[in-house]
């Protein structure tokens, strides 16, 4: 995509306070580095959203593609989006993003940023240990860490596309339990997607029509996340069944 806008921010530490500046304007004041980083992220996302075409929206979702079909993983923080998308990458699935999907009237694209891997997730991703050791990280201050991992470190060709979505999975954690998938009414998926939207201006509803149109053409599923490997296999089987349906073949 062409560059639409540029933003310049500065963070100044003065008298133990982090002052987030844009030019000569003070946007926020924080008193610890993690909160300051959150304020900086919010400011960057707000400027990025303002530069996008009318009707665009940030969704709290991971994204990828497999055998010509593109999918979103929507869910609350802790549902397992990053863990699942990384496990899918280890199975050869194309991954695009783990946290934010940018929905525009033309399609959906992942926000281009490294994947944020929580240290707690490494128990289910033991093959990631050597990769995170070579990655930038920040300390949450409670003994846990977040590592910034580029998909290229996994040995995959990381490509981000702007295109329609074929399937949307809402993740419901059931860690240690059974994994399964259930079809969902598209109207219900719209409600869940709206709950995971990132809105800089709640009064602007121009995104609602494109969101409904996007989800109306995609399969909608609730994915119960139990065993990680079984969850991944269920997701891939569902995508393949969708492929067969799209071609007029029996399931």
Image (tube, rainbow, N blue to C red):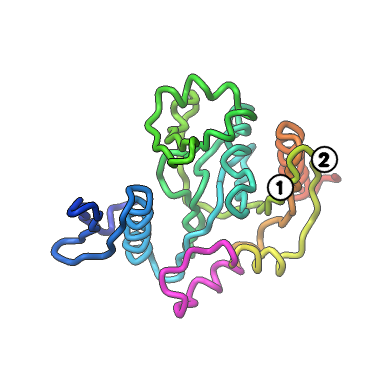
For disc 2, the marked residue is: 178
Which comes before the other along the chain, label 1 or label 2? Answer: 1
Magenta residues, start to end: 195-212
For disc 1, the marked residue is: 173
Indicate whether 116 appears above or below 189.
Answer: above
Q: Nearer the viewer, residue 116 or 89?
A: 116
Q: Does 173 sit left or right of 6 as displayed? A: right
> Residue 28: horizontal and vertical position, in percent?
28, 63
Q: Quadrant of residue 141?
A: top left
Question: Residue visible at 59% across and 67% down?
Answer: 194
View extreme (bottom): residue:
203
- Local SS, label 2: loop
Q: Is residue 105 magenta?
A: no
Which numbered dot is residue 19? none
> Residue 67: horizontal and vertical position, in percent?
64, 37
View extreme (top): residue:
130
View extreme (left): residue:
24
Q: Does 192 sit left or right of 62 as displayed? A: right
> Residue 137: horizontal and vertical position, in percent?
40, 34
Q: Nearer the viewer, residue 140 or 230?
A: 140
Indicate whether 154 appears above or below 80.
Answer: above
Q: Is residue 209 magenta?
A: yes
Question: Residue visible at 51% across and 55% down?
Answer: 108
- Local SS, label 1: strand
View extreme (right): residue:
250
Q: Nearer the viewer, residue 159 or 204?
A: 204
């Amino acid at each position: 995509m062409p560059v639409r806008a540029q933003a310049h921010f500065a963070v100044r530490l003065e008298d133990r306070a982090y002052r987030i500046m844009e030019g000569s304007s003070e946007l926020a004041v924080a008193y610890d580095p993690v909160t300051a980083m959150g304020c900086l992220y919010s400011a960057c996302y707000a400027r990025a959203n303002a530069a996008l075409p009318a009707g665009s929206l940030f969704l709290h979702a991971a994204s990828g593609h497999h055998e010509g079909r593109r999918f979103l993983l929507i869910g609350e923080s802790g549902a397992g989006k990053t863990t699942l998308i990384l496990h899918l990458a280890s199975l050869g699935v194309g991954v695009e993003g783990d946290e934010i999907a940018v929905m525009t009237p033309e399609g959906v694209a992942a926000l281009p940023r490294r994947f944020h891997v929580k240290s707690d997730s490494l128990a289910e991703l033991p093959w990631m240990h050597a990769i995170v050791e070579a990655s930038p990280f920040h300390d949450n201050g409670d003994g846990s860490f977040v590592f910034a991992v580029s998909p290229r470190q996994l040995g995959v060709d990381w490509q981000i596309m702007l295109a329609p979505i074929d399937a949307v999975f809402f993740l419901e954690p059931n860690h240690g339990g059974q994994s399964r998938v259930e079809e969902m009414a598209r109207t219900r998926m719209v409600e869940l997607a709206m709950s995971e939207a990132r809105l800089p201006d709640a009064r602007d509803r121009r995104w609602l029509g494109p969101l409904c149109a996007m989800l109306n053409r995609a399969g909608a599923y609730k994915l119960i996340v139990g065993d990680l490997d079984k969850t991944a296999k269920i997701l891939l089987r569902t995508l393949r069944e969708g492929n067969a349906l799209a071609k007029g073949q029996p399931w």
